[in-house]
Amino acid sequence: MTTVEKRGIEHIPIENRWGTPSDLFWMWAGAIWNIAFVLYGSLAVLVFGLSFIQAVVVILLGNMFYLLTGFASLQGPYAGTTTFAISRAAFGPRGNKIPAMFNWVTLVGFEILAITVIVQAAIAFSARAGFRAGRPAELTFTVLAVAIQAILPVLGHSAILRILRLLAIPFAILFVIMAAITAAKMDLNSGHSGAGWGAMLVFLALVISAGGLGWTEAASDYSRYLPASTGKWRIVLAVSLGGAIPSVLLEILGAALATGVPGAKTIGGLMVGRPSWFVLPYLIIVTLQLFAGNTLNLYSSGVTLQSLIPDISRLGCVVIDTVLCGIFAAYVVLSSRFFSLLSDFLLFGIVWLGPWCAIYLTDAWLRRNRYNYEGLLSRDGGRYFRNNGFHMPAVIAQFAGMAAAALWLNAYPPYVGFLSNHIGKSDFSVFMGLLVGGLTYWLLARASVRAEGKALSLYHTDR
């Protein structure tokens, strides 16, 4: 029987660690088997001008970064708490508020984008039923979508895993059917000349941001329910494959559809040429899957907000996020710039996320995933308080990495970095952020963090 989870960022006792790597595989697969990743794939052809072959190459390379999500899942079983509680070990409890705020905004942004796609599905269904949705109807759909979306995150971790596992297989079957009945419309040789290497790098950055790098910020929120003795490579492989397999298949499908269906960048466009018997189950399953997948964003944004403001309960955080999501989703739904907003959002997120991920993983490697949960959750003082709540090596590395990423970011038209502007309009922001952020932190903190790790016994991190 499903009950409401009371626990937020609190430590998960050893006796309550019931999870397995298989649970993580199906959770990530269930979350990512959704139409948003088909739309990401269509951007390669319809927005960035890549040929189908170019798109496939970039999609395969970009989704290798799910290994980062796998490695970012290793800390949860040892620390027994959420990602942005664990991040306090690297940044200090006060310094950690900087990336935690970035993370919260990013996750709420993903919630808004998913709600927008759900509303697009409702509008497309209405059109099929002969009802042309105007502004009042669009706003009504938005309010209903936001209200429904809040249900599963309120129920909590166990319910999320169960529902996502149930939805993974039917959604995979749906998209096999979709690919089969639209194969005749695909023109894989269209645009055979393709795009330049600069455009390929920009799309690569988007794929990495929407996939493997983009999920590192939530990884330990779910792995914390696994025992600390669980094999590391079992966790890494389960998470990486659970994310990469559906991402690759759906993004390649999106790119293939875009070669023959110009409207494939919208929910309605994906239904062009489909038989009438397919439309209703398609829209129902698509909508259910978007709700389920977006649950990870809402759950993780809630526990991230709780790490920022500990006095708010997890349920209170869900309410705050839901209200804000509804307000901004209404704006995006009524805007005609959805896909430019989507692309800009994913690319700008790289600026903070790459450095943070590198710092977080470098810190975990230096301390060998040895944490003191009481220090992580302490509000005043504690093992990780250091310099008045700040660990300056991480703060310095974060801003250095962000500056480096911004130099080589191409988010045209609102922003093109100096290096991007002078090197073929390319985008190397992901790699700049990861390299500069991680290397700077290693240089500044390697000795002290190793010492902190050695002070703790590997399998007694809960003391």
Image (spheres, rainbow, N blue to C red):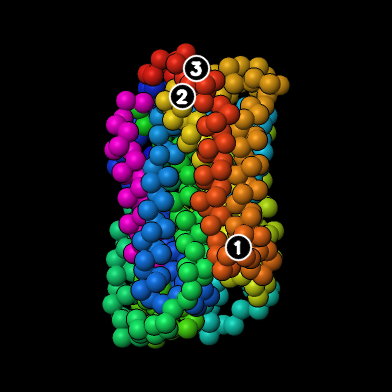
- In the rendered image, the vertical position of residue 392 relative to residue 194, given as above or below: above
Tag 1 secondary structure: helix
Amino acid beneath label 3 = Ala
Measuring from the top left, give residue 396's x and y in whole percent. 65, 35
State the residue position of label 1.
420
Label 1 vs 2, first from the N-terminus = 2
Which residue is more in the foreground, 267 or 98?
A: 98
Q: Please report contact status of discs 3 and 2: CB closer than 8 Å, yes or no.
A: no
| Measured Cα–Cα span from mark 3 to mark 2 | 8 Å
Q: Residue at x 40, y 15 (%)?
A: 457
Q: Residue at x 44, y 69 (%)?
A: 41
- Compute the Cα span from label 3 to label 1: 40 Å
Instruction: Identify the residue position indicated by label 2 in the image.
Output: 367
Prevalent SS, magenta region: helix
Helix, strand or loop status at disc 3: helix
- Where residue 380 sits: x, y (%)? 67, 19
Q: Nearer the viewer, mark 3 or mark 1?
A: 1
Q: Quadrant of residue 23?
A: top left
Which of the 4 quarters of the picture holds residue 246? bottom left
Q: Which residue is mark 3?
A: 451
* Residue placed most toward the observer, 368 or 37: 368
Q: Which residues are magenta?
A: 228-252
Identity of the amino acid at label 1? Answer: Ser
Q: Earlier in the sequence, mark 3 or mark 1?
A: 1
The answer to whether residue 133 is left or right of residue 186 is right
**Residue 64 visible in the displayed image:** yes
Horizontal and vertical percent position of residue 323: 67, 52
Q: Secondary structure at mark 2?
A: loop
Q: Is residue 32 left or right of residue 102?
A: left
- Residue 108 in view here: no
**First along the sequence among labels 3 and 2:** 2
